[in-house]
Structure formats: C-alpha cells, structure tokens
Image (cartoon, rainbow, N blue to C red):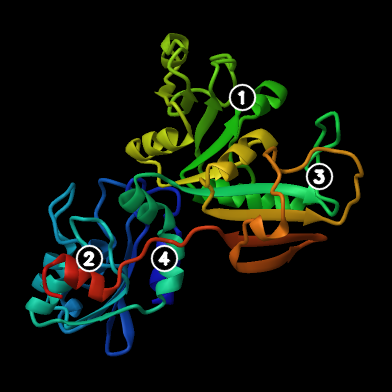
Amino acid sequence: MREALALAAQALGRTAPNPPVGCVLVQSGQAVGRGFHPAAGQPHAEVFALREAGEQARGATAYVTLEPCAHHGRTPPCADALIRAGVARVVIAALDPHPLVAGQGRQKLLNAGIQVTTGVLEAEALRQQAGFRSRVTRGRPWTVLKYAMTLDGKVAAPNGHSRWVTGEAARARVHRWRNELDAIAVGSGTVLADDPALTTRGVPGGRDPRRVVFDRRGRVPATARALGPGSILVTGPQTSPDPYEARGVTVLPAADLLEALLGLGELGVNDLLLEGGPRLAGAFVEADAVDEVRVFVAPKLLGAGLPPLDRPPREAMHLARTLRDVTTEQLGTDTLIQGFLHDIPTLSPEAAAALLGRS
C-alpha cells in the first residue's frame, strides 16, 4: 500500500476534480502491475495496473488507495475491471465518499466473491485525498492556510516589507506545495502591492497551480500577472466581468466567503493554498473556512510589524482555536508547524453499508 500511495503522490495537483489514486497488483509476493490516475478523463489507477499485469492479474491481490469506482463516468467502473481480470483480493486504503460510489465498489467486489480488506494506511490515504473528499462531501475545497512569521509573530515590517522571513529550504517547500495543490489564492492587496506571478519554481516536472484572486471591489487590473487564462477572480456582483473574461479569466461573483468556496468547488477545485496577506487570512479564519494550517516560524525578532491575522481578537485564551494532529519539522533554521482545524471527511464500512441499506 505504501507503494500505491507513492504512485498516487505523482499525480498530486493534476487530477482535479478527481482524486489522486494509486494501485499495485501483487502475485506470489511480487508486484506485477502498477498504476496511478494521471488526470481527469484518463484511465484510473486500476486500469493501468491491470494492463501492466496482463494474465498475472488472475488470482492476484490489488492494493488501491481509494475504493474502486462502481459507476460509469468518463471511464468504465474499475470494480468491474478487477472482477473481469480475476483478481482474488482487493485491499483498500479508504472508502470513497462520493455518492455514486460510497461503498458500492466494495460491495460489487464482495458480491463477486472477491475478498476485500479496508482501512490499510487509511490516515495516509485520507491526507492525500483531503481536497477531493472535501469537495464531494461539503461542496468546497480543502483550504490550507500558509504563512511565515518571525519568532515574535510578525509576517512583515510595518511598511509591508516581507522578503524574506524564512530561508531557502522553507521557500522550496512552499513551491512543492504549489506543485501539489490545485489552486493558490491571494487577496487584492497582495496583487496590488507585489503583482505576484503565483507560479511554481524550482520543482523538476512541476506545474503551476490555478490562480485565484479575491477582489471584492474589482480593484485588480485585468493585466495583473496573477490573472490570465485559467485563473479565477472572486469578486462582488458589481464588478464588470468584461475586461477579465477577455483575458481568459473566470469571474466568480460571490456575496461572502462561503459562497465563493462553493463556487470554487463547482469549478472543480479540490484544494486551495491560501497565501494572501493578514486581511484575507483573517477573513478566512473568522469565517471558519480554514481546514489546515501550515506555519513557518523563523528565528528572528522584528519588534513592530504586521501580525499574520487581521481579525477581531479573542477576549480570553480558552476562546482560541486549537490545532489538532500537530506536527513540527525543521527546515534549515526555520520551524514548520502543521495542524488541522477540521477533520478530513471519511467513510467507514458501517456508514457505507447504511447508505446502501444494509445496516
């Protein structure tokens, strides 16, 4: 299963609106077929693994990071393909919460006499699939808030200067995230001040994330580097879409952040890396729209400066939001702290059975 997860990781950021999935077929203790889903519209992981295995798939064990699909979409059902190939056992990391699957793939395999095991390395699979799971269950992307601050909690000097809070290792990690997540978001203030390109740099074989600009008043010019074909402008209903759409920008009117996130979900965005300034970050936190936090802390003391969140303060410590499943990592002299504010949506075999009326 670890090899299947590693295969799925090769497609992170490339499969939206589909999830990243990996599959390994094992016969007599040897891997005979490997595959991953490279992009929406292309064959699923199981199909590539079965093609490579050929006749050796008969009687083999399939390790797959997500429950095989049981419905016709752009491609035929993978559960049917495994059954036709004569696979004897299927080991599934996590069940698929999509309403068109939700235990039906597992049940198809069981009905065909195939042994099925679920929950193997489930936590790792859920982590890979967080964006897809968020979009199909909540209708909105999995939102990751990222920022870098000094030891005394400042993200920039009083004049807004912030280059560079962290060192090269931390900045390289951010570009790796840009390569792996569907979209990156900033606010109008960041675009007007810095005109960032929001591209991925220094990652071999990397790709640029879809760029999202939150600009409620339509202040950002259509010529901004963050805007162009494939990018999204989230704005108010009073903003004229004409100059933006002429440059291939998708204009998404929204009354508030929740409506904006639901709109991004409808556009197929699975996960969103929030790299805006304190105002946008504060608005997301205040709206309880942040799912995961990734913060770099640099061993620097700035004194006066800008805090990471521009939002009303909590009146007491017990009102503070607390991260769960916190991890820390050293990157050069900087410390990376990661944690969750919301749980990744999952689906247990019992819940799947209830959905299928077999509780």
For marks 4 and 2, give the CA distance: 15 Å
Left/right placement of residue 197 relative to residue 308 reads left
> What amino acid is labelled 1 in the image?
Ser
Numbered label attached to residue 68: 2
Q: Position of residue 195 (x, y in %)?
A: 66, 24
Q: Secondary structure at mark 1?
A: helix
Q: Position of residue 221 (x, y in %)?
A: 58, 14
Distance of label 1 from label 2 (alpha carbons):
42 Å
Q: Is residue 278 visible?
A: yes
Rendering coords of residue 216 (x, y %)? 53, 22
Relative placement, left or right, of 258 versus 152 is left
Residue 154 disc label: 3
Q: Nearer the viewer, mark 2 or mark 3?
A: 3
| Disc marking residue 126 | 4
Q: Which mark is nearer the camera, 1 or 2?
A: 1
Please give the name of the residue rendered at 30% of the width and 46% of the height, measured from the top-left corner. 40
What's the residue type where badge 4 is placed? Leu
The image quarter containing residue 43 is: bottom left
One can see residue 206 in this view: no
Horizontal side, residue 179 vs residue 311: left or right: left
Q: Which residue is mark 1?
A: 188
Residue at the location (21% across, 55% down)? 99
Residue type indicated by callout 2: Pro
Where disc 3 sits, the SS reads: loop
CB of mark 4 within 8 Å of CB of mark 2? no
> Where's the N terminus, which quadrant?
bottom left
